[in-house]
Image (cartoon, rainbow, N blue to C red):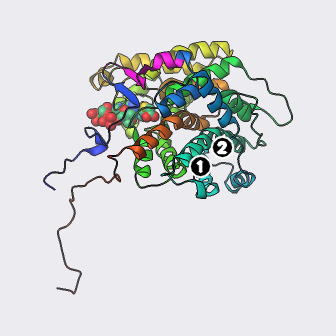
Amino acid sequence: TGHTALDYGFVNTAATTSAITYIDGDKGILRYRGYPIEQLAQNSTYLEVAWLLLYGELPTPDELAAFDDRIRRHTLLHEDLKRFFSALPHTAHPMSVLSSAVSALSTYYERESDPANPEFVELNTIRMLAKLPVIAAYAHKKSIGQAFLYPDNSLGFVDNFLKLNFGVLSEPYEVNPVMSRALERLLILHEDHEQNASTSTVRLVGSTGANQFSSISAGINALYGPLHGGANEAVLDMLARIRESGESVQRFVERVKNKEDGVKLMGFGHRVYKNYDPRAKLVKESADEVLRELGVHDPLLDLAKELEEIALEDDYFKERRLYPNVDFYTGVIYKAMGFPTRMFTVLFAIGRLPGWLAQWREAVNDPHSKIGRPQQLYVGSPERNYPGTA
Ligand code: CMC
């Protein structure tokens, strides 16, 4: 093993080349296919960015319209798959429901899932983009005991999703344009983030020849953890706990610094961004605006700002270059929209799906790609004999 370098957490090792997303963590730069995230968040749509990530260029208006239309025609879930939800407890975490249902989706398309067939790959890309939001909304409805709605394909991607979540059977539903645009922007900000833990998982699973459903379902499970996408839920829980306990923000920060019970400031810190997460900047900017437009005042937003202010002034955070990441302010906005806390990471998953699909394709089509197989440095016992054999 003389040539094997030990790199816990892949801090220094690149496992692939990629032409999809560029990040400069010191300068706080994030670009998809060369386009700055700020411009995309301001001007683009979820589906347009999905196309960009998948195919490398912005779509023409005709290409985008055809893509949108095709996705609308694939939103229905098989009725049997709808029954799958009733087999799970209503207390189930929506992220577990999501990954299980995506895994189960694979069983409906077994004969069309060969990853080496480009037509199938294309079809399953559309299927995943169309059905993940529906599955997500059903996970939400299930958790609150409400009936599932059928997708309304007269609506665009985000509006359809909002209706599936907040519409009630047999009652008209009016999409709030402020909410729709705000959610679209948040989804765009999450669409890709190069080789993070869930994307690396998708690539690794894909490297074995597994199909898109299996690979994405693995990615969803990786995203679930509180150090990754699960942080947006954890941030809100943290803010709510601080508020309920009446503990001062200063005292909470002290406990974080002393690493009491391993408590961390959730939504802070990033492996790559050592300056400021450009996504967090955009989310923070829109948090005030969205809450105001939705007519919501949430003391948890004030608490989050106070926490940020205190942390940014503190040597512990300065020395370690810890800044708010994308998950710090998103939860407050999702909450204002009416999503339960346990749906937050599901929203992240819908956002990230185009990136996972694009990265899976890039990996599968890369002529240099091989099965992912990390090395280890063995530190266990040397050879020894089973009792009675020597
Ligand atoms: N609160 C308190 N201390 C922290 C935090 C935090 N949020 N993050 C890092 N540190 C400390 C850490 O304890 C270590 O200190 P020391 O040198 O004294 O041991 C130092 O900063 C370096 O941290 P690290 O854990 O070696 O950094 P990493 O690159 O391995 O971890 C991270 C990155 C995001 C997992 C980590 O910062 C963290 O746990 N943050 C909280 C969870 C979170 O917000 N995750 C969302 C990440 S962004 C979007 C996403 O992926 O979903």
Depicted 89 relative to depicted 276: above or below: below
Q: Earlier in the sequence, mark 2 or mark 1?
A: 1
Which image quadrant shows ligand 1? top left
Most extreme residue toward the left is: 2
Residue tagged 1: 102
Depicted 242 relative to depicted 79: above or below: above
Q: Is residue 32 magenta?
A: yes
Residue 14: x, y in percent? 29, 39
Instruction: Tell me which amino acid carries mark 2.
Output: Ile
Instruction: Tell me which amino acid carries mark 1.
Output: Val
Q: Residue at x 48, y 52 (%)?
A: 116
Q: Which picture quadrant has residue 348?
A: top right
- Asked if residue 302 shows in the view, the reply is no
Residue tagged 2: 135
Label 1 packing within 10 angstroms: few (<14), some (14-19), many (20+): many
Please name whichever residue, 18 or 306, is drawn nearer the observer in this view of the structure. Answer: 18
* SS for dot 2: helix
In which quadrant will I find the N terminus? bottom left
Q: Which picture quadrant has residue 337?
A: top right
Residue 74: x, y in percent? 68, 41
Residue 262: x, y in percent? 38, 39
* SS for dot 1: helix
Please name whichever residue, 18 or 350, is drawn nearer the observer in this view of the structure. Answer: 18
Q: Is residue 182 left or right of residue 208?
A: right
Q: Is residue 388 magenta?
A: no
Depicted 175 relative to depicted 67: above or below: above
Label 2 packing within 10 angstroms: few (<14), some (14-19), many (20+): many
Most extreme residue toward the right is: 170
Asked if marks 2 and 1 touch (Cβ < 8 Å), the reply is yes
Extent of the magenta region: 27-41
